[in-house]
Every structure is written in C-alpha cells, then in structure tokens.
Amino acid sequence: MSEPDSGARKFRIPGGFWAIAALIVWALGVVALLDRTPYGLDEGTARAVLFLWSISDQVVSPIVTMGIPDFRAVYLIPAGVFFSGSLLAAKLCTLVAFVAVVLGLHRWRSQQGDSETALVASGLLLLSPLTVSLIDHIAIGPFLLLTFLLGSWAEKTYRATRVRFGGFYFAQLLLCVAATSLHPAGLAYPIALAISWIRDRPAEPLEPGMIPGRERTHVLAGIAIATLFGALLAAGWPHQNWFANPLTALAKEAFGLAFESGAGSAIVWTLGAVMLLALLAVLWRTRAEILVDRFVGTLVFAAAIASLTADTTFSLLALVLLLYLGYPMLLRARLGKVGGLLGQRGVALVVLVAFSTLFLSADRARFVLIRQGLELSAQDQLIATLADAIQRSHPVAAQPGLVTEEQKAKSGPRVASQWPGRTMIACRCSTLPLPPVTDDQTKFVANLRGLDYVVFDPKDPTNGALARGFALLGGAQAETIALEPGGVLLRLHPGEQPPSTPTPDGVTG
C-alpha cells in the first residue's frame, strides 16, 4: 500500500485559516455599514473620544474639565493616540474589541464541550444588526463584555497561582473599577467576584502574606475599595436613562426594527415580549449552570441590572444569553418520530435560517439607509443646524486644516451646549457647558460674555430656569435661529445692553 501523498498534507489549509478569512470578510462588511458623519454618538462616548484627542494633540480642551470619562477611554487609546481626530479609527477599535469578545465567548462555550453551539451562536452574534449599531455608536456593551471576559480569566488565573498581592490580584481590582465606571450593570462583576470568595473560597495559603490577615479578607477589602472608586468615577452614571421599556428596546435593537406606532408598534411589543419570556425560560432551565459557572452568573446579574436602563447594553447581554444558553436547548429538541438530520436538528436549523435571514435583511436595509443618509435624532438634527449656521457665519472656522490652530482659536465661535461633547465633535469649535443660572439678570448676562451660540432643550425640566433667563433677554440679545423638536438654537448679540431692571424704589437702573 502506498504512503499518503506528503505534498497533500503539506499544503492542507488549516481550519483556523477559514475562520480568520471569514472574520476579515465580516469586518469589511461591517465597515461598509458604518456611518461616516460625526453624529449618532451619546454624550459619554463623545467626551471619552475628545478626552483622548485633547491629550494626544496636547490641546487644552473644556472636555478635560468636565470630569474623567469612563473606561472606554482606556480601551480606545490606540485609536485616540495614533489617529487623533478620526471617529472612524475609534469605531474600528470598537470593532476589534467586539471580535475579541466573540472569540472569548466562543472559547468559553467550547471549553464547556459544546463547540457546535459556540460556532452557531458566535456567527449569529456577528450577523446581528445590534452588533453593527454597537460598533457604529462606540457603545458601552462590547467593552463591558470584554471586561467581564478579562475578569473571568484574571480570577481563574489568580485562584490557580495564589500569589498574594501579585499582578492578577490587582488586575481583578482594576477590572472592578473598569466595569463599574462603564455601566451600572458593571456592578455585577465585583458583586459576583465577592460572592465567589464568600461561598467558594479556596483554602488559605500556608505561607504568610506581607500584610497580616486572611487572603479572603484581603480580596474582599480590595474589591470593596475598587468598586467604590469605580462608582465615584462613574458619578452616578449621569448619561444613563433609567426605567425605559425593556420590551420595545430589546426587539428594536436586536432586529434593527424602526416602528414607532400603528401595527409596527404592536409587532415590536409582541416580539419583545416573546424574547423576554424566552430569556426567562432559558435562565430557569439553566439555573444549575448559572450557579456553577461564575461567568454566566455575572452575565445574568448584569442583564438584571441593565434591564433598569433598557439600553443597548441590556439588549446585547440578553442576546448573548439567548444565543449561548438557549441554542443548546434547540439542538436537543426532536421533531417527534422524524428521523435523520431533520428529526435531530430540525428545530435548530429552522431557527438558524430564520434568524440569519432576519439579521441579514436588517443589515441590508441599513446599507441602503447609509447610502441615502441616516436619519438623525432630534438632538443630532439640532446640532447639525448649529454646524450649518457656524459654517455660514464663520467661514475660517469651517475649514479645518486650512488655517492654523491659533487662527481658529481667535476667529472661531464659542458655543454653550447641553451636549458639549457631541457639539464639539460635530461643529469643530470651542464648546462649553450651559452657563449657570442666576436670578440676577445682570449676572446672567455677564455669564454669557464671550459666547456666540447657545443650544439646549427648553423642555428639559433641568433647563426651566435657563429658558426663563433667555426669555427675559429678548430678541435683541438672544436671537432664536431654530426651534426644533430637539431643542432651541440661540445666537447671542453681546453688543446689546442688558435690559434695565426696576429697583425697589421704582427707579430703573
């Protein structure tokens, strides 16, 4: 019998090559679906990106005075330092982080002995329109999941090495800070870590530590301090909207739906309710695994906390749990007495084809919208109106790269905005927070000195006093350029004198 051809073995393409090629093709497809405009970001993301750009360019920016950004600024350092001023670079950095998340989830599920679920779930997660939206908006979800994965690895390594106050001890504490600063759901990691050391603590090491006390005490004290520090950095998560509707958010974001009213709204509610019930059923059926696997427990606890915000982070956590915990149940489902592949994998194949079709249809619809121009939110539309007004009235500031930074600083307008980070990125101008409100109209006018434009939402309850202050100024000093659903845009005329106010004796002054 002849030996097998050694040349065939030599040129055999390994399976990992096809996985890498598929990821490259997927990444190129996602890049084609990314928005190139400076809109669509939330305020926290804009401030994190601007913070990095300010440090990289060594430019004093008002953003630096608005507090420390969340931990996304650390993950985005490669894009912020080497590609300062490029939003596309920050989005590509988010794409790389998401690839790391998918690879980590695939490895975690494969280690459970379920490589089939790991492959299918990872593929569906990559095709989901939610994934494209998260990358395009540089959202918190991918970075939070990456933090959870790194935290799980750091915990396992620390328990294996048991080096007191070693690198992995402090790595866990740093990841506690990172997760807590990113999102309220990040509290799940330090809480799950603390519970694991309370309920499943390893035996105490024989050698004494540098600091007196038990190892468990050292770990729990470090977790508490790190979590408190992360919560202080988060400052109450001011950019989070609490108590939104989780049903509509889950359906819209997971499937890329855009229905707001009518029959479409009923579809969204129904689909959201079905997904939430399916998630609860999956969690109930896998409750034993949740109690054993600390990473799964962290995801479940994080999803419970994120349901209070009902944002994209909640949708991502729910989708990950459904795919990686729910799909194995579909693989075990049988179609009655039907034999063969259809009987063994029929339910799983139907769900796979249906979800893949829905996801790809949503991605195709997004591609069409990208070519036509994505519809801006009400606030972004107001900021775009401001950008157009600045281009018309300040042509020097509207030509970035053609004038020096000193010229732009002297000639460019100054804007006070309710969303200073988003406004600064879109308008490329000096932007400050809204001026303080005072009952003294003369002081209020003094606080406006140096400002050319003010943009804010007068319907926001926190801006009621500010809206009254501008109403008292009158049109001579504060001209209304635009009044839109997202808010109002005012142009200030500092040359005008403030209105005289009556004194207690009736004499105007």
Image (cartoon, rainbow, N blue to C red):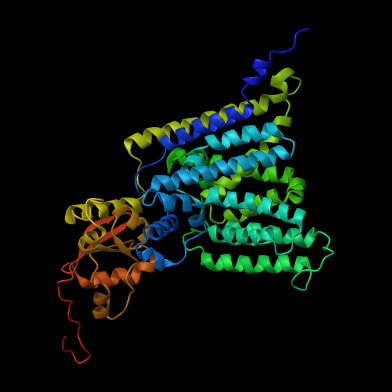
Q: Quadrant of the N terminus?
A: top right
State the image coordinates of residue 302 (x, y, percent, origin top left): 62, 54
User: Is residue 78 positioned above or below 346 on the image?
Assistant: below
Asked whether the viewer can see residue 119, the reply is yes
The residue lying toward the viewer, choosing from 421 and 454, is 421
What residue is drawn where x is 77% and y is 66%?
A: 215
Q: Left or right? Give the position of 483 relative to 13.
A: left
State the image coordinates of residue 249 (x, y, percent, origin top left): 51, 47
Q: Left or right? Give the position of 501 relative to 43.
A: left
State the image coordinates of residue 439 (x, y, percent, origin top left): 30, 80
User: Is residue 112 positioned above or below 70 on the image?
Assistant: above
Asked whether the viewer can see residue 134, the reply is no
The picture quadrant where one finds residue 218 is bottom right
The picture quadrant where one finds residue 11 is top right
What residue is drawn where x is 18% and y is 76%?
A: 498
Q: Left or right? Give the position of 160 relative to 265.
A: right
State the image coordinates of residue 244 (x, y, percent, origin top left): 51, 54
For the image shown, how many numbered marks are present on the structure? 0
Q: Quadrant of the C terminus?
A: bottom left
Q: Left or right? Give the position of 212 relative to 250.
A: right
User: Is residue 139 positioned above or below 470 on the image?
Assistant: above
What residue is drawn where x is 35% and y is 48%?
A: 38
Residue at the extreme bottom: 505
What residue is drawn where x is 34% and y is 51%?
A: 380
